[in-house]
Image (tube, rainbow, N blue to C red):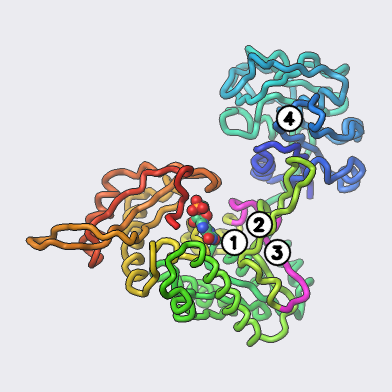
Amino acid sequence: MDKILVLDFGGQYNQLIARRVREQHVYAEIKPYNKITVEEIVEIGYKGVIFTGGPNSVYDEKSPHYDPAILDAGIPVLGICYGDQLMAFMAGGKVDSAENSSEYGKTTLFTDNNVLFKDVPKESICFMSHTDYISEPPAGFKTIAHTPKCPCAGMCDEERKLYGVQFHPEVTHTIFGTQILKNFIFDVCECNMDWTMEDFIEKTVARYKEELKGKRVLLALSGGVDSSVAAVLLNNAIGENLTCIFVDHGLLRKDEGDFVEKTFKGQFGLNMIRVNAQDRFLSKLAGVTEPEKKRKIIGEEFIRVFEDEAKKIGKVEVLAQGTIYPDVIESGKGDSAVIKSHHNVGGLPDVIAFDEITEPLRDLFKDEVREVGEKLGIPYELVWRQPFPGPGLAVRVIGEITEDRLALLREADAIFREEVANAHCEKMTNQYFAVLTDLRSVGVMGDARTYGRTIVLRAVTTDDFMTAEWTRLPFEVLEKASNRITNEVPGVSRVVYDITSKPPATVEWE
Ligand code: XMP
């Protein structure tokens, strides 16, 4: 399989670059600049290398540099932003600081005739974000693009197949960015389009049939997209030898536990154990109001329940986890890059005896996991499920958690989701749900005064959940949800919409 290496110099778009390449059905992987040598790059046989951007200036003492031998290794290189300046610097060109005239945002790009700009108009819009610029391309390089402020917005040494662009082709603001990346991947690197999800499924299933032959595999199934896709993929390879444990902690949304069970046990014939542990969780949570304490109790109890079930199965050789690529990527920011530790169910590997861990999705981005899910025939509701926190509705019932309060929230939440779906607004928002507050307020129904609960509706729009905007859902949707909740859910007298972004608020209320 042809591969492109994204060599990370600490740029914020490293994952985006790799995803853009993979969208062209060419496999791309990210490595920090200080974790792979030129010899290794040659040995692995990458068809091309992309240097990412980064926050530094090439003249900073601490700025990340790379072995110049890469430029003569016979492998095409594309430098982006800092990567472009670094390539110029390594090859003996001149980089200057344009401190008073840094370029940020959309800019008009003028391109020359060059393979990198095949099917790109002479004049188009690109996205710039830089202070330093190449004032003199290195010997052997020629300038192939410019902007009103940047004399060398693109350069190349055709003989050595070295290309650089000052702008960011990976972001959508660069209108012909995808075309430029395609030109590099296919015309310069001569890659084949051999990265497809059908192929991934076929190869993974075939590999597991061999590797896991006769081994017993255990998976914690949450009903989220990652563990669901991992489960079906493994089931296709080893069937009965896979045991999935689905812990229903009683903090799921309306009908969710039954839906997960029906889908996996029924449709896919998965060897699945559903543990109905509602009582265990509710009794541990009785009287607890502090959010972090709720989280801790649920996390710990989850492990205990899982452990008890696993013990019944006996010896397990392999533990499978739904880890995905963004969880395992090391960043090229600074020298002390660490791998983010990630366990779908915190701490499981420490308490269950097993010989090895397998992570079927560790090479895939989220959108690829979804595509695999669709190809495997997993229902739309699961494949496109919005994120749902591990502690579930416990962090959406403010204050004490009781069965009655959970039931009330489940109804209100189901109505809200139904109305968003009825209005086809799911694509407007990345996460949306109801919260039951501990606030009571006065209302009037018929001729009687009421003193009921307050429900909050929350919907956010975000790329990464680190920051989020409140979603501008149509008033009609909010009105309908509010009317229905106050009419259909006894005990609710007021519905409010949360119009706070993150920061300063968080997505969840607790
Ligand atoms: P916050 O509330 O921190 O949420 O802005 C960001 C995203 O993380 C989810 N979230 C959690 N997920 N366990 C989880 O598995 C948790 O304790 C937890 N708290 C928040 C939240 O739903 C949102 O998608």
Which of marks 4 and 1 precedes in the sequence?
4
Which residue position is annotated with label 2? 324
Residue 206 coordinates in the image, percent (x, y): 74, 67
Q: Rounded to the nearest whole Å, what is the CA distance between mark 1 and mark 4?
A: 35 Å
The three-letter code of the residue at mark 1 reads Asp
Does the magenta portion include 358? Answer: yes
Q: Rounded to the nearest whole Å, what is the CA distance between mark 2 and mark 1?
A: 8 Å
Question: Foreground: 236 or 305?
Answer: 305
User: Tag 2's secondary structure?
Assistant: loop
Which residue position is annotated with label 1? 226
The three-letter code of the residue at mark 4 reads Asn
CB under 8 Å between callouts 2 and 1? yes
User: Which dot marks residue 359?
Assistant: 3
Q: Quadrant of residue 189?
A: top right
- The verdict on label 4 being within 8 Å of ligand 1 is no
Report the label total.
4
Question: Foreground: 19 or 412?
Answer: 412
Mark 1 or mark 4, whichever is nearer to me: 4
Residue 28 coordinates in the image, percent (x, y): 73, 45
User: Which dot marks residue 56?
Assistant: 4
Residue 138 coordinates in the image, percent (x, y): 85, 18
Q: Rounded to the nearest whole Å, what is the CA distance between mark 4 and mark 3?
A: 35 Å
Which of marks 3 and 4 precedes in the sequence?
4
